[in-house]
Amino acid sequence: MAVPKIGGQQLQVDPSQAVARECVCGCPYFKEVYRVAIISKFAPGNKTNQDITMRTPVYICLDCGEELFPAGEKKEEGDGEG
């Protein structure tokens, strides 16, 4: 289990305090994939003069393919999927 770091310091956490998550379909297994976005070299604030590829890790249910959202967050209605 990866231990999170905040401000460059590793947190001291007890893995036995972790709460298992399940998908809405009940499956407890996920795979890490990446959502990819491109920041145009013409975007305000991009001083590199090059397109920038951003990768954001997300977790996908191995059974139904739904994305696992952080606790308390829900998939937005009309997000273009389905």
Image (cartoon, rainbow, N blue to C red):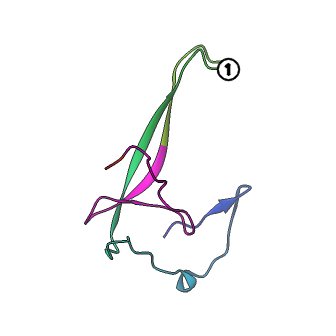
Q: Position of residue 4 (x, y in %)?
A: 61, 64
Residue 48 left/right relative to 29: right
- Circle 1 — which element? loop
- At label 1, counting other C-alpha atoms closer than 10 Å, the crowd grade (few under 14, some 14-19, many 20 or more) is few
Give 69 or 15, whichever is nearer the viewer.
69
Q: What type is the residue that disc 1 sits on?
A: Pro
Give the residue at the far left of this rendering: 63
Tell me which segment is drawn in magenta. Answer: 56-80
Q: Residue at x 53, y 64 (%)?
A: 70
- Above or below: residue 67 compared with residue 56: below
Q: Position of residue 20 (x, y in %)?
A: 45, 79
Magenta region, main secondary structure = loop
Q: Position of residue 10 (x, y in %)?
A: 67, 65
What residue does disc 1 label? 44
Q: Residue at x 47, y 57 (%)?
A: 75
Give 37 or 77, whichever is nearer the viewer.
77
Give the residue at the far right of this rendering: 7
**Number of marks in picture:** 1
Give 77 or 64, whichever is nearer the viewer.
77
